[in-house]
Image (cartoon, rainbow, N blue to C red):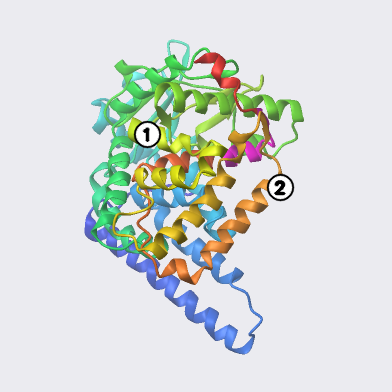
């Protein structure tokens, strides 16, 4: 893969890059409508593929927050056309890495010494490049390490990157008014935390120790003395990324076992720790030769306040969802129903979220649940298509729900997707024996 010798870090240079990308997308639309004038049967597939490719190509060299948002969107398989999902998913662990000279220069800037002054061996070629940083192999005194190096300028460009992305997100999710700022503030705060590698090491150690009793779950050891604000040193863990693992043949028993470990890991975090690994994409998990699940990235941790946790999980109980008065009260507590809503809006959004939550919480209504079930995923896709084409919904204020929904829903949807890829049947309450 071609390497990068320089990353645009200034606001002007990054904005110029995105404007150039926008120009390409505009040209793609002109080309598409010209062809459609002569062929009314032409679908949007080619347009989506060209746009997805041009947008990703523009973002991958910028790295940072803009690319991270693309990575987040790639998990929303029911929201975006497949062409975007496939392209944006590359942001999880396959983007152009920094060149060897830039890696060496960046390492010295962040750690005060060149890699060869600290380690016996250091591979200048990246083994994994993502949106915020890239990983290298190293050895010292016979021990093998993974060294995560943050890209230059990422932490300083978060606010300006989000300002560029905001108009697109506002239109996509139909957000209106100043009230929408709470969602962008939530994203910005989390991205700032993800660039603080001292915080990530502390989070990694805390959660890995708390979850250490869960079988078939492994974590690397982290080394503070070899880490800094922009560099993390941890044990090198052998295994395949979950996305690679699910492409090969594996037995139903193995899929169920890994899926159960993944489920227990997340439910324990939700219900015991009240904080959760909120970035469940396949690039953050490895599967070793003994089918252990290895969690390798704790940059994005979402704390769950009680005032959100309680009503959120109360709505996972069928009798609560089906009690109209109780349900309406919880929608208000979760800020889904707003104080300024009209009767029409209350009725509309109550029905919408009743249908949505009845489906998304259905795994909690059973002792075991088959996440490989195509019926479940077809229902999710059908619901998404129904509301994405609902003209009535587009007229209404899209500012719905507490800002905590952003990362909690993202976590559940990502978890459900990983379990679907594993075709896993899980015991829903098995995690309780570790509480």
Q: Does residue 122 show up?
A: yes
Mark 2 touching mark 1, by CB under 8 A?
Answer: no
Tell me if residue 417 is in the magenta stretch.
Answer: yes
Q: Does residue 98 show up?
A: no
Mark number, residue 302: 1
Q: Residue at x 43, y 16 (%)?
A: 210
- The percent position of residue 134, horizontal first and vertical second, equals 41, 37
Name the one closer to the observer, 266 or 342.
342
Mark number, residue 374: 2
Tell me if residue 174 is in the magenta stretch.
Answer: no
Q: Secondary structure at mark 1?
A: strand
Badge 2 crowding class, 10 Å Cα cut-off, few under 14, some 14 to 19, many 20 or more, is few
Magenta span: 416-426
Name the one closer to the observer, 216 or 383.
383
Q: Quadrant of residue 37?
A: bottom right
Q: Residue furthest bottom?
A: 38
Q: Residue at x 57, y 28 (%)?
A: 263
Name the one closer to the observer, 409 or 16.
409
Q: Quadrant of residue 346?
A: bottom left
Q: Secondary structure at mark 2?
A: helix
- The percent position of residue 125, horizontal first and vertical second, equals 46, 36
Name the one closer to the observer, 145 or 333.
333
Q: Earlier in the sequence, mark 2 or mark 1?
A: 1
In this rendering, the count of numbered labels is 2
379 up-or-down from 228: above or below: below
* Residue 323 relative to residue 292: left or right: left
């Amino acid at each position: 893969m071609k390497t990068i010798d320089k990353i645009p870090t200034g606001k002007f240079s990054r904005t110029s890059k995105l404007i150039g990308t926008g120009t390409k997308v505009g040209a793609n639309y002109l080309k598409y409508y010209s062809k459609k004038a002569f062929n009314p049967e032409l679908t949007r597939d080619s347009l989506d593929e060209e746009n997805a490719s041009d947008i990703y190509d523009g973002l991958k060299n910028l790295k940072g927050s803009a690319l991270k948002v693309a990575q987040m969107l790639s998990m929303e398989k029911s929201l975006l056309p497949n062409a975007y999902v496939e392209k944006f998913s590359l942001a999880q662990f396959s983007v152009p890495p920094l060149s060897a000279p830039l890696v060496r220069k960046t390492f010295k800037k962040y750690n005060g010494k060149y890699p060869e002054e600290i380690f016996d061996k250091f591979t200048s070629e990246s083994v994994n490049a993502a949106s915020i940083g890239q990983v290298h192999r190293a050895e010292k005194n016979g021990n093998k390490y993974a060294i995560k190096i943050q890209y230059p300028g990422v932490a300083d460009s978060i606010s300006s990157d989000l300002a560029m992305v905001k108009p697109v997100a506002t239109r996509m999710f139909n957000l209106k008014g100043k009230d929408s700022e709470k969602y962008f503030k939530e994203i910005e705060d989390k991205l700032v935390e993800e660039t603080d590698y001292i915080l990530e090491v502390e989070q990694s150690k805390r959660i890995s120790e708390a979850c250490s009793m869960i079988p078939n779950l492994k974590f690397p050891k982290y080394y503070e003395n070899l880490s800094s604000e922009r560099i993390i040193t941890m044990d090198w863990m052998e295994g395949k990324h979950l996305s690679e693992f699910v492409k090969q043949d594996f037995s139903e028993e193995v899929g169920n076992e890994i899926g159960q470990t993944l489920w227990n890991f997340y439910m324990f975090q939700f219900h015991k720790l009240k904080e959760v690994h909120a970035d469940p994409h396949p690039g953050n998990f490895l599967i070793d030769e003994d089918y252990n699940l290895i969690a390798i990235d704790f940059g994005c941790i979402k704390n769950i306040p009680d005032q959100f946790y309680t009503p959120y999980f109360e709505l996972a109980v069928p009798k609560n969802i089906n009690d109209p008065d109780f349900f309406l009260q919880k929608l208000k507590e979760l800020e889904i129903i707003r104080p300024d809503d009209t009767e029409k809006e209350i009725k509309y959004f109550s029905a919408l979220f009743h249908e949505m939550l009845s489906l998304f919480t259905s795994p909690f209504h059973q002792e075991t649940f088959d996440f490989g079930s195509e019926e479940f995923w077809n229902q999710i896709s059908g619901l998404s298509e129904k509301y994405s084409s609902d003209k009535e919904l587009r007229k209404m204020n899209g500012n719905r729900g507490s800002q905590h929904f952003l990362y909690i829903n993202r976590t559940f949807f990502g978890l459900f997707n990983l379990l679907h890829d594993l075709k896993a049947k899980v015991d829903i309450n098995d995690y309780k024996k570790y509480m």
